[in-house]
Amino acid sequence: MSDANRVLNIFNIQSFSVEYFLKLLKERTTLSVQLSEREILVVEVRQEELKPLPILEVNVPLGWKKAIY
């Protein structure tokens, strides 16, 4: 298995700092962490641009703060 596809053990990564774990993830884009004999967690980087928020035309009535909610 190549280093890029290496499965990390949950006990090994417990000593990693968050910064180091994120650095590894950024370098490899995918990390697999073995939680138990039957469970493997795959963490993958996804870089998507956020869509811009829509511009809404609204009318806020005067005195809206004084209303009873």
Image (spheres, rainbow, N blue to C red):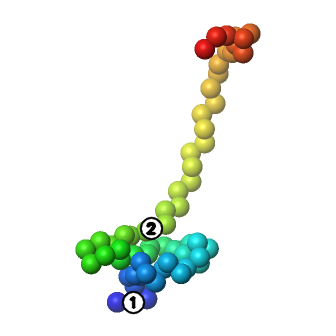
Q: Which mark is residue 48?
A: none
Mark 2: which amino acid?
Glu
Residue at (25%, 74%) from the top-left corner?
38
Give the residue pinned by disc 1. Answer: 2
The percent coordinates of residue 17 (x first, y second) are 59, 76
Q: Is residue 55 above or below residue 52?
A: above
The percent coordinates of residue 22 (x first, y second) are 56, 72
Choose the circle earlier in sequence order: 1 or 2: 1
Visible residue check, residue 23:
no
The percent coordinates of residue 43 (x first, y second) are 43, 68
Q: Is residue 39 left or right of residue 26?
A: left
Mark 1: which amino acid?
Ser
* Disc 1 secondary structure class: loop
Residue at (48%, 73%) from the top-left corner?
29
Q: Is residue 14 above or below residue 67?
A: below
- Which is more toward the observer, 4 or 39? 39
Residue at (72%, 11%) from the top-left corner?
66
Q: Residue furthest left?
A: 38
Give the residue pinned by disc 2. Answer: 44
Q: Quadrant of residue 4?
A: bottom left
Q: Is residue 6 left or right of residue 21?
A: left
Q: Quadrant of residue 9?
A: bottom left
In contact (CB < 8 Å): disc 1 and disc 2: no
The percent coordinates of residue 37 (x first, y second) are 27, 78
- Which is more toward the observer, 17 or 26? 17
